[in-house]
Each structure stands twice: as C-alpha cells, then as structure tokens.
Image: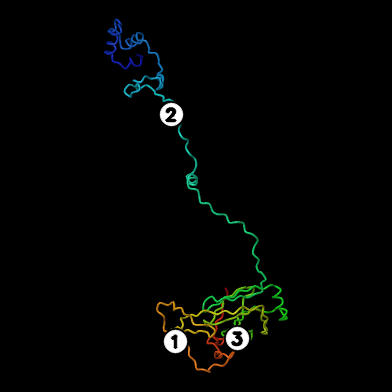
C-alpha cells in the first residue's frame, strides 16, 4: 500500500493494520510515525501490464468447447479464412450508369446514306392538270430554260409576268380559241404548281401557262389536258334508263339489283334528229353548258 493511501486511513485503522503486519510498539507511535513505519513494512506493488489472452482459432478448439456456454468471455474466436466470404467493394458507379447497363436504350435506326440530290427540274416541258374535287383543280408544270427563253423571244422583252389561263371547255373539242369562257390568274415568280378554284362542278377545264407583257401580249409555254370535275350533288334523275346501241344485241342476263328501280325508255319522234354518218340519226346539236358563266363571277385562286 502506498504512503498516500495510508494517509487517508484513520489512526485506528492504521493500528489494526500494524498488528496484522506484526509491528511492535505501534500504540505508542503518533500517526505520522505510524504511517512511516507502515510504508517501510509494506513493500510497493510492482506495476503490471495487462495483456490480452492469446487468440485461438476455431479449428484448434475441441468440439465440446465450440458451444457458446463453454466459451470464455476473454477468448477471441478467429474464423477460418477459407470460410470467410470476402467483402464486396462498394460500387462508385452512379445509378444512371447502372440503369443504362440494365436497361439499354433502344437502338435508333441509322438512315441510309442519301445519294445525289434530286434536280430542281427535269426539263419535261409539260403542264399537268388534275381535278382535286368538284370545285378545285391542281396544276403543276416543268419547263426548261430554253423553253422560257423562247417565250421571251416571241414577246420581244423580258418584262413579262408569269400567267395561268383557265378555260371552260365543257362539251367542246378545244383548239385554243373556242372556249366558253377564260380567266387569267397572275402567278408568283418561280412557282411550279398552283391550286385553282372553279365556280362549277361537273364541268370540263383546260389551262395554259405562259408570260404576259404589260401591253397584254401572251406567250404560251404549254397547255394541259382537259379534265372534268366530279358532280357535287346526286343526280336529279332518280330513274334508271337503259339504252341499247343498234350495233349491239340486248343482254339476256337479269339485272344484278335486288330491287330494281323503275325503268323508262328513251323515246323520240321519228325524224326529229338529223341524219348522221351511215344515214343514222344524229343527236341534237349541243347548246352552251350551264357552267359557262361570265369570267367576272369567278374567284381567283391562291398560291400553294
């Protein structure tokens, strides 16, 4: 016991400790003297270092010591390295990259390499007219520079505007001069197509494209074919009429209709029609169609 610890004891406790150690005459000593005699009689304890017990491997222990109750609290059990599963390294890959690996993006088809660019013109030198619906036509054209220069040469000047001329040729064999009516539509320079509204359905039309000077001279580049717009309403005649040409025999097959409509026969007075080729009666002469109206009642078209 150290001297500092002895000073904390009472004199009575020190006397009892002195009797245990066999110190004689302790009762006649004062406390300080008693503490000095006790310090000399009791040797100091050597300092000791606590070391952990040696570790034991599980394989070195007997089978009966492997139970939890048999293991000492101071025994360190080291598992067999061959049975230990190594720890997996922590992944530093971002979640976006992991999702991209699990769910790859669909492959975008690569467009095949395009060949040479299409030419702006094929120099066909033609004008085509189409009937889009009962009240609208569509025209497109393609003319070479030689054809255009030839039109300028005929006009004697290049101060001319492109023009689209529309003709109503219903029931006519059009030759460029015998149309029922005509209307001029000024075009935007360098256009090659145009939508053309018409005032009447079930009518035949033809167009020309060219250049017109300020003095009204017109040089044509080309003329289209004749087209007929479809009917915009049902037929006003609800009956079904049959007519057998003289050079054909009547068909013996029944009508394919389940409920045939009432039939009417085309009748005429003998000799009421003039004689045509081969001494056959020709149909009556044609009159101006109902689609032939003044050009002022027509509406101009709009650009494509």
Of residue 65 and residue 282, the one placed in the foreground of this image is: 282
**Looking at the image, what colour scheme do you see?**
rainbow
Q: Is residue 85 left or right of residue 18?
A: right
Quadrant including the N terminus: top left
The x and y percentages for residue 75 are 37, 21
Of residue 255 and residue 46, the one placed in the foreground of this image is: 255
The x and y percentages for residue 95 are 47, 45
Q: What's the mark number on residue 179?
A: 3
The x and y percentages for residue 119 are 66, 66
Asked if the residue under mark 3 is in contact with the one under mark 2, i.e. CB atoms within 8 Å, the reply is no
Calculate the distance from the C-alpha at mark 2 to the C-alpha at mark 3.
Answer: 104 Å
Q: Is residue 44 left or right of residue 159?
A: left
SS state under label 2: loop
Q: Which residue, given by chain and number where applicable, does mark 2 sit on?
A: 84
Of residue 267 and residue 178, the one placed in the foreground of this image is: 267
Q: Earlier in the sequence, mark 2 or mark 3?
A: 2
Q: Tell us which disc is closer to us: 2 or 3.
A: 3
Q: What's the mark number on residue 264?
A: 1
Calculate the distance from the C-alpha at mark 3 to the C-alpha at mark 1.
Answer: 35 Å
Q: Residue at point 66% right, 69% down? A: 122
Calculate the distance from the C-alpha at mark 1 to the C-alpha at mark 2.
Answer: 106 Å
Q: Tell us which disc is closer to us: 1 or 2.
A: 1
SS state under label 1: strand
Query: Where is 168 relative to 194, above or below?
Result: below
Q: Residues within 10 Å of mark 1 (few under 14, many from 20)?
A: few
């Amino acid at each position: 016991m150290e001297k500092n610890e002895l000073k904390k004891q009472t004199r009575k406790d020190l006397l009892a400790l002195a009797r245990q150690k066999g110190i004689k005459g302790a009762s006649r000593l004062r406390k300080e003297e008693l503490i000095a005699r006790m310090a000399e009689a009791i040797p100091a304890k050597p300092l000791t270092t606590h070391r952990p017990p040696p570790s034991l491997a599980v394989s070195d222990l007997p089978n009966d010591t492997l139970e939890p109750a048999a293991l000492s609290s101071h025994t360190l059990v080291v598992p067999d390295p061959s049975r230990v599963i190594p720890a997996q390294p922590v992944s530093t890959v971002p979640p976006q990259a992991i999702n991209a690996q699990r769910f790859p993006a669909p492959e975008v088809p690569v467009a095949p390499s395009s060949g040479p660019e299409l030419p702006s013109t094929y120099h066909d030198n033609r004008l085509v007219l189409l009937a889009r619906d009962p009240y609208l036509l569509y025209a497109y054209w393609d003319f070479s520079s030689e054809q255009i220069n030839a039109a300028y040469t005929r006009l004697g000047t290049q101060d001319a505007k492109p023009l689209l001329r529309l003709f109503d040729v219903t029931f006519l064999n059009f030759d460029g001069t015998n149309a029922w009516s005509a209307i001029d539509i000024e075009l935007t320079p360098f256009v090659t197509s145009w939508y053309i509204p018409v005032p009447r359905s079930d009518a035949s039309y033809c167009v020309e494209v060219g250049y017109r000077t300020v003095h009204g001279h017109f040089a044509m580049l080309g003329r289209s074919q004749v087209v007929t717009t479809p009917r915009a309403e049902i037929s006003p005649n609800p009956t079904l009429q049959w007519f057998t040409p003289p050079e054909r025999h009547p068909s013996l097959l029944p009508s394919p209709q389940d409920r045939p409509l009432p039939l009417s026969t085309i009748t005429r007075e003998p000799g009421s029609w003039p004689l045509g080729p081969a001494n056959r009666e020709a149909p009556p002469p044609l009159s101006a169609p109902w689609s032939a109206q003044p050009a002022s009642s027509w509406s101009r078209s709009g650009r494509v």
